[in-house]
């Protein structure tokens, strides 16, 4: 895929409609997969997020295999050195998906969305320590507002679930690590995003299947009475394929716009998830302190989106080289975890 010139010069084939539609597609996919996952795991009380993650792995393998077979997408054929090239990405990829789904099942969507903003703080710290990128004061204020609001909300979370909090914080760590390793592997593994998506899913499917079987979740899922409900089946299958669709929409949005636009759309989607999640799933318990904390976190998200957008405005771009602390801090795009 060719790089997109977001200034609009020399890339006349990309129309305004393509830019807008790809951003809307990403925003819809990112929002929809969160809602569908929450509906399957909470509203329908599907007993195993591990089995759901197996379905998402299988869907990615099948879709990408067929895409390569029909020459819709391209990535290298399997060779013995591919596992060495992409390790430890498959482990991070699997953990990110499983713990993200576990957090989605255990927590209300407003708290899940608020706690997921810790991944931005972790990414900021990693970029500072590893890449030497120092964020501006305003960016730091926005990130601290997101995290501080989440902590305030957590201090009065009447539906507190220790496992859910633990799952989300593990997912946050894996999301930050995924951003660092994904960039490194894209630069060195020479297989592109489709290849990384395919082989991450392929290598982790069997270990995930064995682990799910040993924990007894396959038996729980097999005995689930909702398999006869066609509405549940449709939503379960949607959840399986939406993981791939989300990754694909992320690529499109970044290609036709920029990584910046993808980040901003993700921030705006998170706000929708926060408020709509108060009515979806039936597991959000209102309290004033919790609500105030969530709203502070949302305000921090809006400030973050505004600041990162301004940093790529023409006037800011002209001065971008004058100071290292003006480099854009972007959280890594992901799957369901992009919440």
Image: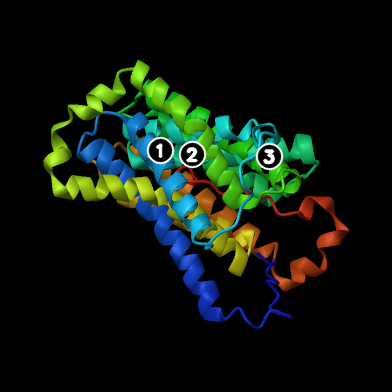
Residue 5 in percent (x, y) is at 70, 72
Badge 3 or badge 1: first in the primary sequence: 1
> Is residue 279 in view?
no
Label 3 Cα crowd, 10 Å radius (few <14 / some 14-19 / many 20+): some
Label 2 Cα crowd, 10 Å radius (few <14 / some 14-19 / many 20+): many
Badge 2 or badge 3: first in the primary sequence: 2
User: What secondary structure is marked by label 3?
Assistant: helix
Residue 108 in percent (x, y) is at 32, 37
> Is residue 42 in view?
yes
Residue at 77% x, 45% y is: 133
Looking at the picture, tell me which residue is in the foreground, 211 or 78: 78
Image position of 333 with respect to 203: above or below: below
Which numbered disc covers residue 180? 3
Residue 184 quadrant: top right
Residue at 77% x, 36% y is: 130
Residue 76 in percent (x, y) is at 64, 49
Which numbered disc covers residue 112? 1
Q: Are the residues at dot 2 and dot 3 in contact (C-beta closer than 8 Å)? A: no
Residue at which label 2 appears: 116
Q: Residue furthest right?
A: 322
Left or right relative to 203: residue 162: left
| Foreground tag (2 vs 3) | 3
Q: Are the residues at dot 2 and dot 1 in contact (C-beta closer than 8 Å)? A: yes
Left or right relative to 297: residue 284: left
Label 1 Cα crowd, 10 Å radius (few <14 / some 14-19 / many 20+): many
Image position of 312 with respect to 141: above or below: below
Image position of 98 with respect to 237: above or below: above
């Amino acid at each position: 895929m060719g790089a997109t010139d977001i200034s609009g010069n020399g890339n006349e084939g990309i129309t305004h409609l393509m830019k807008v539609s790809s951003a809307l597609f990403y925003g819809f996919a990112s929002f929809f997969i969160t809602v569908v996952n929450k509906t399957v795991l909470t509203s329908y009380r599907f007993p195993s997020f591990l089995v759901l993650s197996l379905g998402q792995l299988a869907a990615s393998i099948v879709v990408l295999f067929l895409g390569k077979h029909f020459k819709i997408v391209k990535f290298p054929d399997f060779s013995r050195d591919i596992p060495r090239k992409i390790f430890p990405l498959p482990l991070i990829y699997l953990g990110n998906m499983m713990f993200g789904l576990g957090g989605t099942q255990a927590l209300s969507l407003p708290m899940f969305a608020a706690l997921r903003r810790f991944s931005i703080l972790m990414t900021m710290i990693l970029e500072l320590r590893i890449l030497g990128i120092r964020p501006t004061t305003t960016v730091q204020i926005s990130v601290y507002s997101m995290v501080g609001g989440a902590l305030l909300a957590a201090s009065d979370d009447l539906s507190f679930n220790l496992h859910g909090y633990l799952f989300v914080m593990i997912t946050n760590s894996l999301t930050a690590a995924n951003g660092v390793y994904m960039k490194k592997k894209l630069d060195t593994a020479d297989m592109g995003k489709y290849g990384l998506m395919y082989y991450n899913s392929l290598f982790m499917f069997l270990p995930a299947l064995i682990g799910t079987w040993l924990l007894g979740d396959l038996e729980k899922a097999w005995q689930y009475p909702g398999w006869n409900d066609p509405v549940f089946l449709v939503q379960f299958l949607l959840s399986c394929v939406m993981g791939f669709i989300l990754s694909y929409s992320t690529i499109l949005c970044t290609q036709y716009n920029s990584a910046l636009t993808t980040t901003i759309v993700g921030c705006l989607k998170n706000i929708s998830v926060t408020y709509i999640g108060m009515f979806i799933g039936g597991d959000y318990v209102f309290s004033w302190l919790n609500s105030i904390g969530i709203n502070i976190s949302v305000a921090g998200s809006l400030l973050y989106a505004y600041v990162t957008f301004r940093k790529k405005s023409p006037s800011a771009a002209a001065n971008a080289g004058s100071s290292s602390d003006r480099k854009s801090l972007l959280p890594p795009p992901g799957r369901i975890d992009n919440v």
